Amino acid sequence: MQTASTNICERLCNKSIREISLQLNIPRSTVSDIITKWKQLGTTATQPRRCGPCKMTEWGQRMLNCTVRRSRQQPEESIAKDLQTSCGLQISTTRVHAELHGMGFHGQAALTSQSAI
């Protein structure tokens, strides 16, 4: 399979997007996107993502879930320290908060029953 740089070279040799698409057997939109990217950025290389890769592995999420289910009243700072000491998992309190929110745990105060006033 030919690369994006080949597409650009062919484009510069006055071939149309349609001709390049038929020759390489790839969609015209792909050829067009590659050429547009090259014109805007000067390269077809993949640019770095805005956000990084996932912070926690599936194992880390399971450990976090177990820790929270053991004692639900624990603050996030305490959860982060507990994961660090017991599992060696380096995690910040903001990441703990985000992961718990994603798992469906929300910091809501429990309702207290009041006796007749």
Image (cartoon, rainbow, N blue to C red):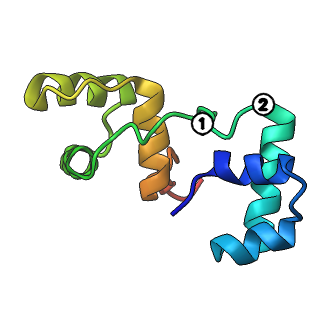
Q: Which residue is depicted at the point 28% across and 48% down? A: 61
Q: Which residue does the numbered mark 1 point to in the structure image?
A: 49
Can you tell which of label 2 and label 1 is closer to the viewer?
A: 2
Residue nearer the viewer, 28 or 59: 28
Q: Could you say where residue 50 lies in the image, as x and y percent from the top left?
A: 64, 33
Q: Which residue is depicted at the point 42% across and 46% down? A: 100
Is residue 112 something one can see in this rendering? no
Q: Could you say where residue 107 lies in the image, as x and y percent from the top left?
A: 50, 44
Q: Which mark is residue 99?
A: none
Label 2's element?
Answer: loop
Q: Quadrant of residue 86?
A: top left
Q: Which residue does the numbered mark 2 point to in the structure image?
A: 42
Marks 2/1: CA distance? 18 Å
Q: Is residue 11 left or right of residue 48?
A: right
Whichever of callouts 2 and 1 sits on the residue coming sooner in the sequence is: 2
Q: Could you say where residue 7 lies in the image, as x and y percent from the top left?
A: 71, 54
Is residue 11 something one can see in this rendering? yes
Residue nearer the viewer, 15 or 33: 15
Q: Crowdedness of circle 1 by 10 Å Cα count: few (<14), some, many (20+)? A: few
Residue 12 higher or lower than 41, as above or below: below
Q: Is residue 83 left or right of residue 27?
A: left
Name the amino acid, label 1. Answer: Arg
Residue nearer the viewer, 40 or 5: 5
Q: Are marks 2 and 1 in contact (CB under 8 Å)?
A: no
